[in-house]
Amino acid sequence: MSSVRPQVWALADINSFYCSAESLFNPAYRGKALVVTSNNDSVIVARSAEAKAIGIKMGEPVFQVKHLQKSHGLVICSSNYELYADMSARFMQTLDDLAPAVMPYSIDEAFMDLSGMSAFMDLAEFGRIVKSRVARDTGLPICVGISSTLTLAKLANNGAKKYPATKGVVDLTCPARQRRLLRITPVGDIWGIGKKLSARLIDAGIHTGLDLAQANTSWIRSEFSIVVERTVRELNGIACQEIEAVPPTKQQIISSKSFGQPVLELEDMLKAVASYAVRASEKLRGEGQSAGQLTAFLSTSRYGADEQYSNSLTAPLPHATQDTRIIVHSAIELIRKIWRPGLRYNKAGVMLGDFRTPGEEQEDLFAAVSDSVKSEVVMGLLDQINASQGSGLMKFGRSAGSNALWEMKRGNLSPAFTTRWTDLPKAR
């Protein structure tokens, strides 16, 4: 008898995450058409079910839906990344408390390895427990899909979202149930099948998920790709994809944003770039890495009648470091070299590269032995204070303060309810 236990995956996914997070702390938003906008409040990046029902499309420009505020009570919120990141962390922690192994897939969804669990617990019941516990601990609504491969778990999750009778949980480990759901699922709704690929498959006579599952794998591979072939195999219960429990170390870190309005003065540009360098340094320390190379870049808009200019400059850092002070100083020096006065800049940023593990790189023979230790202590204290008292409490010189010229436009920004003391909800 084989001792290999059958693989079982569950996918927990927050329903309309950004909108749910906004409604969680603003009860008046619940049941209303609500959208969340992108950087600079330009396009729609998230929609509540009610917003979808009145025809608002993903990626639609904000100015085209503003009239719906009066006619349909539409609520428009700016992206609150601090709130979403914190609520995502709470969601992931709850899953960690319940499941044997959790593999985050995106900010609002994670796979859980449930292999072997069916021997002592009903899988659908476990899904209901997860749904209930996440609601209790975070207030966020989720759906849970369970099956034998990642693609089928994604299919189960879609079914849990689409069909109210499921009450948000679908166990799709039974092959007969898999076939029934595949039969009523458009091929474009299968994980990994985008709009263009869907059109090609439909032209080839493949209209549903079941059509795709029953397609000849050799033909699929020759006419489409090995990636689509793997999807076919996954739909038939053959695992071909994996989710890494520990994400691989990044090879580079980029911190960049488009400005709320054009930047004309060098001092404003340096302040913006300094703030991006600070953020990149924080991410670098979060990865447990040091950087040996820095790139700084800036550009004007590619559109309009203004003169167009784009430039970047890369230079090695004095030594591999994760010290914000060194990275900010180097970024400012590079921007000074590529700055051209008299232009209307709309974007800038920094990129860190040449990563090394601290303590493993060759030390500078002429540097004081205690320099790296002092740097590590200072940066550690900085991160600790900002983490405990709110991100950005302690800042570096030029990056401190606020400048509406270059900061993102977020005119409908909700408070950072969970990460900033001054924004904590108050009892009335």
Image (spheres, rainbow, N blue to C red):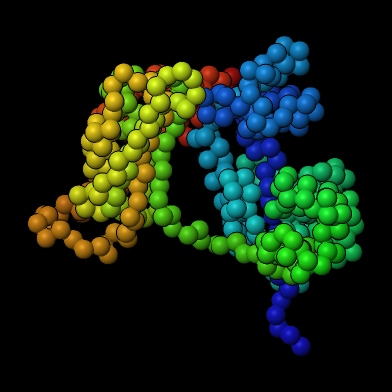
For this view, does 262 lie left or right of residue 317? right
Most extreme residue toward the bottom, as rendered? 1
* Residue located at (35% from left, 47% from top): 352
- Judging depth in this view, the residue of 404 and 400 nearest the camera is 404
- Judging depth in this view, the residue of 322 and 168 nearest the camera is 322
For this view, does 52 lie left or right of residue 269? right
* Residue located at (63% from left, 21% from top): 62
* Residue located at (68% from left, 47% from top): 13
> x and y percent of residue 335 in the render?
28, 33
- Judging depth in this view, the residue of 93 and 105 nearest the camera is 105
Task: Tell how many labels.
Answer: 0
For the N terminus, the quadrant is bottom right
> x and y percent of residue 392 in the render?
37, 33
For the C terminus, the quadrant is top right
For this view, does 28 lie left or right of residue 367? right
> x and y percent of residue 63 in the render?
63, 17
Most extreme residue toward the top, as rendered? 70
> x and y percent of residue 264 in the render?
34, 19
Picture layout, residue 159 above or below residue 50: below
Does residue 60 appear in this view?
yes
Quadrant in the picture for residue 235: bottom right
Picture layout, residue 87 above or below residue 232: above
- Judging depth in this view, the residue of 104 and 385 nearest the camera is 104
Does residue 385 appear in this view?
no
* Residue located at (69% from left, 53% from top): 192
